[in-house]
Structures are given as C-alpha cells and as structure tokens.
Image: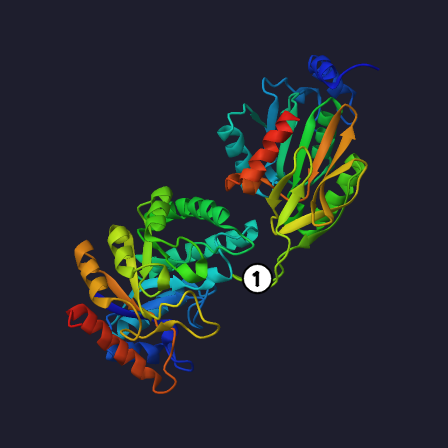
Amino acid sequence: VKKSIGDNLIPHGWSFEQGLDLIKKAGYDGVELWLGDVPWFQMSTPDAAVLGLLRQVENAGLVVSNVSTGLHWETPLSARDPQVRARATRIVERQLETAQLLNTDAILVVAGLVTEEVPYNEVYVRCVAVLQELGEKAAQAKVRIGCENCNSEQKFLLSPREFQTFLDDVKRPYVGLHLDVGNIHDTGFAEQWVEINGPHITRIHLKDVKKHRGRCGHESVYTNLFLGDNNWPAIRTALTKVGYDGWLVAEMEDRYSYAKDQQFYDTAAGIDRFVSGRL
Amino acid sequence: MGLSRRSFLAAVAGAPAAAVLARPGAARGRLSAAALPRIANSDVALLDPEHSCILSESLRGFVECLRASGIEFKKVQADAIGFCKLLVVPGAIFQSSQLAEVLRDCAAIGATVLYESGAAYAAPEAFAAEQRLLNHYFHVAIGPHLELWPGSKAVNPSPRELYVRYTWPDETYIRDFSRIVLVTAHRGSTIAALGATPVACMTEVHCGRFIFLGSPIGPHLLAGDRGAATWLQSLLAA
C-alpha cells in the first residue's frame, strides 16, 4: 500500500515545487494531480509542460498516483446539451492522455450528476453509453477510469449494489470504482462498498465523515481521519479481505486554519496508523 | 367527397412516384427521378437526418422504443423515404429547404410526419433558418427557444413546472428537456404545453399531417420514460 495526497491541497500561494517538497517530507510516496483545479495543470497545459510536471514530481522523489479532476461538476458527462457532453468527454480523454504522460494508470471521473433538471434514468443511460466509449480508449491507453462515488453530491449510484450493476452494464474492464470512503454519509457503510466492489476499485480516497445526510449548509461534513463516524477497523479489514494493496489517497476538505503544512504531516501519520492496524 | 383517409392512403400507396413527380422541386437537386421513393413494407419509417440531427440520442431513443414495443419500422435517409403511415424525424433541424420539402411532400400524400425539433440546441443562425422554413412550409411560427434551467446547479432552489402536458392523442405528461421551442402561431391545434405555453402542434397538410414537437421526447424514450413511450404508441394507434 502506498500513500498519496492531492496537489489541490497544497496551500494557496505555494508553488508546485514547494508543495511537492512538503508532500515528500511528510512521508507520502506520491501525489494526485488535479486537472483543472490547480494553476499548474489545466486543460490548456501542453504535453511538454505536463512532462515538466512529471520531472518535478520525480525530482522530489515522488510518483504520480493518479489524475483526478473536479471539472465534471460544471461540465457533466450526463448533461443534456450534446456540446457540454462533448466537452466533458474531452476532459476524460485529456485525463487519459496526461495519465500516460505522467506514468500513472488511473484517473478519477465524476461520472454523472442527477439534478432536478436531469433525472436519474437519463443520467444512467448517458453515463453507461459514454463510459463504454471511453472504456475502449482507456483500454488502449492502459489507464483505468475510476468513477468516484460522490453519493450525496451526485445523487447517483447511491448504494454499492447499484454501483456494481452500473459497472456490469458498462462492461468495460478499464472502468471501475474510485472509492471515497468518506462520501457515503448515512446512506451506507464504506466497508460494504469495499466488499461488494473490491475487484473494481482503482484507487481509494481517504477522509472521515460526520454522517449527516448530505451537507449542512456550507458547513463541511468531511473531516480528518478518525474525527468522524467511519468505522476504520472495519474498512481496513474489508480492504484486507478483498486484497486491495493499491494507493490510499488523502483527500481533505476541511483545511487547517493555521499551520497549513501540519495537516499534511498529521494526515500521513493517520494513514500510517490505519495501515498498521493499530486502531 | 366521401373518401376516408384510410381509403385514400391505400390509393396513394400505389402511386407514390406520381405523387413525387408532381411535387414542387422534384426535378431539382437530390429529389430527382433517380431518388424516387420506394414503398416501404412498414407503416413506420424513422428518418436518420444525419447532419441535420442535433440530438443523436433522440434517434437512438426512438429506435430503442420502437424495437422494445415490437413495432416494425424502417430507418431511411431523406432521399429515399417510401410511403409510410408515420414518419418520425428525431432531434432535427432544417438546414436547408430540401428536408422541409421532402417532409411536406410526405405529409401531402397522407403520412403523419412527427418532426421533433432539436433547434433549441442549435446555433443562432441555424435556429433562424428553422424558424423561416417551418413558417414557409408548414405555417408553424416558433419563437426563440426558452432556457428552462438558467444557470442550473445540482440544486435548483425555485420549484417550477417540470412536465409538458400532452393533450393529443392521449393525455400524457413528459418531462421538459431543459430548453423548449415555443410555438407562437400555427394553423392547426396545440397538442402540448408547458404550463400555458404551447410547445407542440399538429397541422393538416393536404391528406396528411405535420406534428411539431418543440420539446424533445426521444432522449426520454432512451431513458425508458413510460409517458413518452405511451405517447408514441398512442400516436401509432391514432
């Protein structure tokens, strides 16, 4: 098992290089790069500059664990407008391209967004169709697409059985689940997601959650490891049971107000405790 | 004259070539004698509008629904439409007068043409062409498209009417498709409205009829919407 953390957590005002230095010093093995969420890695960033990012990562003694993006919240693959869908598809293609350049084999995609405007059934059929196409491209690139379970925000694929059925319908081996153990809230239990979808897990986001339903206004329900309601021993046992030995990627939403770099150290120590089983 | 529509259809089905040759513009462009329509075995034809299709998932929706309903249909191109009882034109836009002429002629010899406009998703200049051609060939006037979910996010705070109410051939409710094309004037009857706003109409064209849908239903068919499937089945039975 290897530890990683997102470059979108690098404190504002810090350079990428400074952030990588912090990540290395805090004890991580890799970094998750967020396409579109940080100034140094945008859709317009050319291949040469992406290779430059890889060099910086390697110089820091790290590797890229995976390529993620938050761009699909504004540009969903499930949009009704064909032009928006085309842009959303292009984002995934660029993720696949950059993943290859960055020597990693996984990307994170927020696959569909159920809203009052765009109902569940529409989102489902669109996502299956587009992921079947993208699954072929992913296979060619040898990069796995991990669809993240953003249960509360997406209002989509709310249970682990639903997710399993979804992946069965997509039926592409290079399309799987990027499991976020903090995103399940009070609609289920992370360890059950692990057991049911174990072989399909591409990467795991680690964070804790206070199990309110959804969000409470602007107050985040996500918190640092061991401060929330996740059953960490059960999650660890389930991961052992399904044989997951891939990346554990820290994703914090609530940020430290002061000593921002300390959050990197504390989170790394928390992951180490989780991995060690001393819970 | 005491000729029923069914009798007329039976008669004209034997003479499609004559009907086509008689139509304006038949001698020019793609509608030449070389492209005389064939008589389809099926009562239902589904036009693949190719480059005139704005919503490709709408075409897939009609295909899947017709297949699932066990209804025989033929997929046809604009230059080879046979005589049929119902011609479905999904997610389309009139990019030139050619398609409009073909559809008008199909209706004129007795077909029901179901024209689902994808214009709400087209560029402004294409939308303007759609307005002009609809008015010229079918006397259907459409207003600018209406964005029903401006700046929509995951949560829309203001509740609003979500369903288009169809009143013909049966009363059915189908969700809106985010943007609608408003029907501002026509010579037939309004068959669907969102609240009080007409979004679909039916007009007589000689022996047939032209149905304009300003709110697409094809994507709903693809998503398995029961109301949309029922509406299509009712139309086939009407």
Looking at the rendered structure, the kind of residue marked 1 is Asn
- Quarter assignment of residue A212: bottom left
Q: Quadrant of the C terminus of chain B?
A: top right
Count the numbered circles shown.
Answer: 1
Chain under numbered label 1 = B
Is B131 in front, or is B198?
B198
Q: Is residue A190 left or right of residue B218?
A: left
Q: Is residue B7 left or right of residue A273?
A: right
Residue B48, image x and y in percent?
59, 33
Q: Is residue B29 left or right of residue A207?
A: right
Please say which color scheme the image uses: rainbow
- Quarter assignment of residue B130: top right
Q: Residue furthest bottom?
A: A258
Residue beneath the point at 23% across and 75% down = A270
Is A48 in front, or is B30?
B30
Residue B173, image x and y in percent?
62, 42
Q: Is residue A27 visible?
A: no
Residue A11, image x and y in percent?
38, 80
User: Dot 1, how many residues are within 10 Å of its Cα: few (below 14), some (14-19), or many (20+)?
Assistant: some
Q: Is residue A3 visible?
A: yes
- Quarter assignment of residue B54: top right
| A56, above or below B5, in the image | below
**Which residue is tagged 1?**
B156
Q: Secondary structure at mark 1?
A: loop
